[in-house]
């Protein structure tokens, strides 16, 4: 059974998954790197960047699971880039350079479709204007029996949770109060009742939460 | 130096410290006992109720610190009881019966002062309509060199945090999404920058956070 999985989604104590004011220079808005610093230290992240080294402890054990058995990704348009509304620059192909770390089909949710783009290394960006179940159907088909990763951002994950389309949710709570940005939990009262929930704190001070279908 | 301390303040993943719809039958509103179940299992809580037994593990180690070296408490009126506005029932002396577990002076913040009430066991409720620093001054004087516990609820703690009047903050994050109620963190962006923060998860699945002055 092909599952829908979320990995390494970092939020603040007050539940914000990204800061206010995303721009080309500030992909996470006023949050800067504070939500993702634990991740940037891991071997998993460094390896995605083509670099050696990095932490190999508990944070990395969680981080590394992001890509196991995944055949496609779905992401919101705000994860793909800072443009809003009709595309002004169709040369924009994401934050990740010529060889993005996904190496699978990636379905970008947008109300402004544009032609698919094939990148180096097997990543192809498809731009989909469809209800979530239909976008998921396309991603599942592309995943060819493997799982679909729901890559974020927080408003995209929140929307899939509301429609009960997520099977595994890995959240990382960073002990900061961000104050503003995009909230993850809104509209998902009682979410825990549909999942088996585990929590564990690691020496970096973050708390890993996993929500798994019982 | 007499410190201001918060202990055992439970919040949901989405930051609510109490539910919506507090009433005589539902002190925590729609949250019921979900935020406090970890605490009710502890020896510390059972002892406050005059009962034997209870868990003596990590949760209790945190819980037990609530009363060490404390000479007075400040609480918001909504912790004291469900009445709002002018007092309709001055016979109401809190949720805790004839012998409340505080055994010190307790300063209840309210815009509707009433005469102080001495209970069994050394608890005296004083009703104070004053700015927070003045209420704190009175509590400090009553504490006679010991610490002042800020007993909650969440909106009271939030207000003291905004005025930077808290020295030690112990928060317990319960992995549920409450959806509505009284938020703790609002208006406290960047709070962590004033504190040394530690996090630890216990086998009950809650996460204890301590914010301490560096």
Image (spheres, coloured by chain):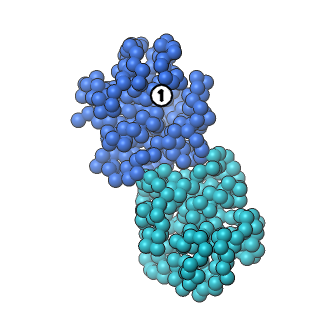
Chain colours: A cyan, B blue
Asked if residue A115 lies left or right of residue B191, the reply is right
Instruction: Give the answer, above or below, for where A147 lies relative to B62.
Output: below
* The quarter of the displayed image where residue B132 is located: top left
Asked whether residue B64 appears in the rendered view, the answer is no
Residue at horizontal 65%, vertical 58%?
A159
- Judging by the rendered image, the residue that carries numbered circle 1 is B79
Asked whether residue A17 appears in the rendered view, the answer is yes
Q: Quadrant of the N terminus of chain A?
A: bottom right
Asked if residue B172 lies left or right of residue A130, the reply is left
State the SS at label 1. Answer: helix
Asked if residue A26 lies left or right of residue B24, the reply is left
Instruction: Give the answer, above or below, for where A48 lies relative to A20.
Output: below
Comparing B37 with A35, the one in front is: A35
Residue B67: x %, y % from top left: 38, 30
Chain of residue at mark 1: B
Residue at horizontal 49%, vertical 12%?
B91
Comparing B28 with A89, the one in front is: A89
Local packing at callout 1 (Cα closer than 10 Å; few below 14, some 14-19, many 20+) is: many
Residue B37: x %, y % from top left: 56, 36
Residue at horizontal 48%, vertical 28%?
B78
Q: Count the marks.
A: 1
Residue B73: x %, y % from top left: 37, 27
């Amino acid at each position: 059974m092909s599952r829908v999985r979320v990995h390494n989604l970092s939020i603040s104590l007050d539940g914000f998954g990204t800061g206010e004011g995303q721009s080309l220079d500030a992909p996470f808005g006023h949050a800067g790197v504070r939500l993702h610093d634990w991740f940037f230290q891991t071997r998993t992240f460094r390896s995605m960047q083509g670099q050696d080294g990095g932490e190999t402890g508990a944070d990395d054990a969680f981080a590394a699971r992001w890509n196991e058995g995944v055949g496609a990704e779905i992401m919101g348009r705000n994860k793909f880039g800072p443009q809003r509304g009709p595309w002004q620059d169709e040369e924009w192909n994401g934050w990740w350079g010529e060889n993005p770390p996904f190496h699978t089909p990636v379905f970008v949710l947008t109300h402004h479709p544009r032609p698919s783009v094939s990148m180096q290394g097997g990543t192809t960006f498809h731009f989909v204007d469809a209800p979530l179940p239909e976008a998921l159907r396309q991603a599942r088909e592309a995943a060819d029996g493997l799982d679909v990763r729901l890559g974020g951002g927080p408003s995209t994950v929140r929307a899939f949770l509301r429609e009960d389309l997520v099977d595994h949710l890995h959240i990382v709570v960073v002990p900061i109060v961000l104050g503003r940005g995009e909230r993850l939990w809104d509209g998902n009262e009682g979410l825990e009742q549909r999942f088996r929930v585990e929590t564990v704190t690691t020496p970096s001070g973050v708390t890993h939460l996993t929500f798994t279908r019982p």
